[in-house]
Image: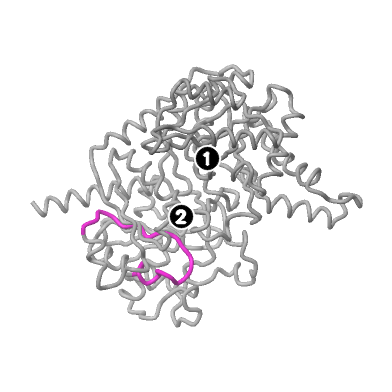
Amino acid sequence: MASKYIFVTGGVTSSLGKGIISASLAKLLQARGFSVTIQKFDPYINIDPGTLNPYEHGECFVTDDGAETDLDLGHYERFLNTPTSQANNVTTGKIYNHVITQERKGAYLGKTVQVVPHITDEIKRRLLLLGQTGEFDIVITEIGGCVGDIESLPFIESVRQLRWELPTNDSVVIHLTLLPYLKAAGELKTKPTQHSVRSLSEAGVQPDILVCRSEHPIPPEMRQKIALFCNVKVNSVIESLDAETIYDVPLLMRKEKLDERVIKKLKLTSKQDLDLDSWKEFLGRLKNPTAEVHIALVGKYVELPDAYKSIIESFIHAGAHNECKVNIHTIQSEHLNCDNVHQHLHHLDGVLVAPGFGARGFEGKLEAIKYVRENKIPFLGICLGMQCAIVEFSRNVLGLAEATSTEMNPNTPHPVIDLMESQKEVTEKGGTMRLGAYICELKKGSRAHAVYGKSRISERHRHRYEFNNKYLAQLEQNGMIASGINPDNNLVEMIELEHHPWFVASQFHPELKSTVQTPHPLFVKFIKAAIHYQRNKNQVLI
């Protein structure tokens, strides 16, 4: 069967949750036996979010094939338990870059290159790309930004053209909008939704289904009013209430019969009975924990939770697996020092030192690691977190007082972390790091080997600096084990401490592969270690 296409647009305001609605609908369709993928089309001119500050756009998610992508792709993977790729995230920058490159090559045979048809044709080509692989029954496309934004116009126009070109029952447009509650009036207001739908209709796209975000239930008469003035059927006005957790949304959308409406409009027949048993089991464990731990997330972007979105979600997955509530305490590493580190960390059950770039907050991360190393508190370091663990150990155990990364001090006499050889001639910033999935071989008998239960793993990376193997012998003689090695270039991928209950760090990003169905083993075992530490600590206090 030819692929069917679902386009998800948004209006009134940003951050309404198009990514979560798209992922939830995809989950429901997957649970009915369909093969589904989701792609994100972003209207910004950056070629990818890799050069964006996390405060601007949240975390940069990385795929197996090395794409730096929007964080919504993380939601797609976590909900569907299937990997995304370069093709799943397209920006205005990518579109224009391709068209301009083609124009320079003479591909348009001297024609005047214009937004219509050249830009819109390239957008349409990419909108259809995943559907033409034959792998997917349904392709969901989330259009970033808001309807009415100048940046979004070429994407909306491309959707309009595709709707005209595709067979009648091969596409559906879902428009996500807001029903604000005015406290003074004591009621929900439909006018912003009406204006949003009008803007979309003026661009030539009539939505088939409206998903209305609301803080209060939508009365039946209001649904009828929305349907009448927005030109949709009453049963196509879908209520989307604020949820306790994003993982409730598939069940809330099921209750609203969003999947049934989509299937009917696409003239599809379910391939199997809806199967959400494992999803409901996950929610049961998540909402009924038998234990509770407190974990520090030490980083430099903690003011914006989306900057560490995948880490936070990985804790949720691992917590549910352990039937444990994970309370995350974000700590700004820039504020940590030797005088206050005890005050910040002594009462916690585990510490994660987060990834990042640059010198700001670096010394604070070292103080956190020294504290957990000396006080035997469970520790997990990721990317820069592993590099910090090596610097701290080099300074305070090996006695190399000026040891650091050349990222922080290019003239350090002890560059225990150094720029990768392959990066030394790189001058451009976008998409030039060591990116994507690489093989790592684990040392038998190590904690890392026990965590994974196998000797060979594949994990995703995003870094320019690496451990300097000249210092490996010194570190291992003093109790730090290089437990994971890349077989192709001998790069140290994982380290751990010999005489510590749970001190593990990785150069790769384990959080990028954690999903509801397969929580990442490093997070699962880290939380288990935190539960064990807490119980032992409480027994001592008693």
Residue 422 at what x, y percent from top left?
A: 60, 67
Q: Secondary structure at mark 2?
A: helix
Taking 20 as reference, is 361 left or right?
left
Label 1 vs 2, first from the N-terminus: 1
**What sort of colour scheme is used for the picture?**
one colour
Is 279 drawn above or below residue 486 in the view shown? Answer: above
Tell me which residue sits at (33%, 68%) in the image. 335
Does any portion of residue 298 appear in the rendered image? yes
Q: Secondary structure at mark 1?
A: helix
Real-space Cα separation, disc 1 to disc 2, in angstroms: 16 Å
Residue 243 at what x, y percent from top left?
A: 39, 35
Depth check: 515 or 334 in front? 334
User: What residue span does the magenta drawing correspond to?
Assistant: 347-366
Magenta residue check for 473: no
Taking 167 as reference, is 509 left or right?
left
Residue 19: mark in rendering:
1
Residue extending furthest front?
Answer: 185
Does any portion of residue 483 appear in the rendered image? no
Is 343 drawn above or below residue 168 in the view shown? Answer: below
- Look at mark 2 in the image and give the residue it sits on: 307
Amino acid type, label 2:
Ala
Depth check: 121 or 32 in front? 121
Residue 86 at what x, y percent from top left?
A: 63, 47
Tell me which residue sits at (57%, 39%) in the image. 11
Amino acid type, label 1:
Gly
Taking 392 as reference, is 220 left or right?
right
